[in-house]
Amino acid sequence: MSLNLSFLGGAGTVTGSKYLLESPSHRILVDCGLFQGGRSLREMNWDRFPVQPAGISAVVLTHAHLDHSGALPLLVRQGFAGAIVCSEATAALCEVLLRDSGHLQEQDARFANKRGFSKHKPALPLYTVKDAEAALRLLKPTSFHEDHSLPGGANLVLRRAGHILGASSIEIGWERTSIAFSGDLGRHDDPIMLQPEPLAKTDYLVVESTYGDRSHPKIDPQRTIEEIVGTTAKRGGTVVIPAFAVGRVQALLYYFARIKLAGGLGNVPIFLDSPMAVDASEIFCKFRSDHKLSHEECIRTCAVATYIRSVEDSKRLSDSPVPKVIISASGMATGGRVLHHLKRFASDQKSTVLFAGYQAEGTRGAAMISGARTIRIHGEDVPVAAEVRNIDALSAHADADETIEWLKSAGAAPRRTFVTHGEPRAARALQTRIAKELGWTCIVPERTQEARLNEAVIPQAKFVGSPRSDH
């Protein structure tokens, strides 16, 4: 029996993670993420799935971030009806993230139609809250370290990957072949999340390469945050922090709680303007076994900010001249309430826009960090006069050195390693390091490329979409 692996997303980019594993009779999809970033990537979300969703037997999620889970409502709407298997914390977070994503899709479509800045008449949501709820009904939470049966005789084991609450590396045994997917690996010395668990020996490996070409700077994030906020407040400005609602927001709240506990930043208020992040923070305190914080630390972390839920309160927050910190999604400034805060404060010389980690190519975040003097929001060109900073040390992704250490934990070389989920330069850099330092056979696949796992070489001309791709 042969197994085929197709790279439907997360190849050549850090978004849209989708890997299709096929036997002659069944298909298992690993991750089902949205493409995020520039327009050319986002437009891929509107394409029909390259194989018939009804023919997919099951989906396995590595974690809840939308670039790994956000296309599930589309998959279900197009016909998928199987189980979506994930860790218990991932299921809880998906309940929040997918509903919120559907809500934002509907909200953005209404806003575009009201303001008339969309080229589509009318602008339509990619999917709705109703679509998200249909996908949520298929979630099947499972525990870490336990054998779980998948359709077609496959076996699944989840291991902790760090990164965010519930994040998993997954191992699938199928047709006498084993294949592991790293998911998004966390940091080895993260103050909140648990360290990624060792990689078991495997025949094939798919490993992420988000930071495959760099190492994280050795700085103290807490001290840097305090310095940036203190300096901005002294000149009468506001610090706007675009941050992912799951993972990055909780890390920021943790550092702000420690700063306030030590007497720093005086009466500078901290606001969390993201209903999704508020809900995610509550889930964070529920799943204590998935992170390092004590109950008391969880309570203190969640209590450091004033939570903003309503649109009206969010608008009043932007209008307030008081020096403050506004943490709001999304982390790369691609959507959400943070765009309204950027429209207000990006042009203010007294204020600071502080990014908290990786910014994918084509995003507003990447443009601002690169020195863009204007950014386009809701059809308007907004000047950038505020100070723009980025703290890479806040990233929840393992850097290149940490990834190599995790790979070494396998103890033996896989037959083949596929380097994915990175910009081309990062993926190639990690491929080179793995080959040079570990002596492993490494490939950087292209999107839609298909690998026959029991063959000696990957067929370079084989891409998903040929007649055999649909049973």
Image: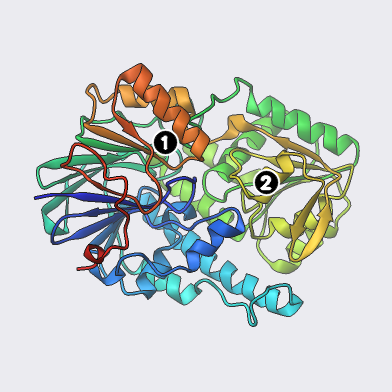
Which residue shows up at 31% across the image and 45% down it?
460
Give the amino acid type for the residue marked by disc 2 in the picture.
Gly
Residue tagged 1 = 185
Which residue shows up at 17% across the image and 60% down it?
26
- In which quadrant of the rendered view does residue 55 lie? bottom left
- Across and down, in percent, residue 278 comes to 58, 55
Which residue shows up at 58% across the image and 53% down it?
37
> In the rendered view, does 59 fall on the left or right side of 373?
left
Number of residues whose C-alpha sits closer than 10 Å to that of mark 2, classed few (under 14), some (14–19) or many (20 or more):
many
Give the camera-side residue of 182 and 466: 466
- Across and down, in percent, residue 209 comes to 45, 35
Which residue shows up at 13% across the image and 62% down it?
25
Residue tagged 2 = 365
Give the camera-side residue of 270 and 1: 1
Q: Is residue 147 above or below residue 464?
A: above
Extreme residue toward the front, this view: 461
The earlier-in-sequence mark between 2 and 1 is: 1
> In the rendered view, does 50 fall on the left or right side of 385?
left
> In the rendered view, does 43 fall on the left or right side of 349?
left
> In the rendered view, does 222 fall on the left or right side of 412?
right
Give the camera-side residue of 1 and 126: 1
Give the amino acid type for the residue marked by disc 1 in the picture.
Leu
Q: Is residue 317 above or below residue 224?
A: below
- Across and down, in percent, residue 387 comes to 82, 39
- How far apart marks 2 and 1 lie (CA) works out to 22 Å
Indicate the secondary structure of the residue bearing disc 2.
helix
Extreme residue toward the top, this view: 437
On residue 459, the disc is none
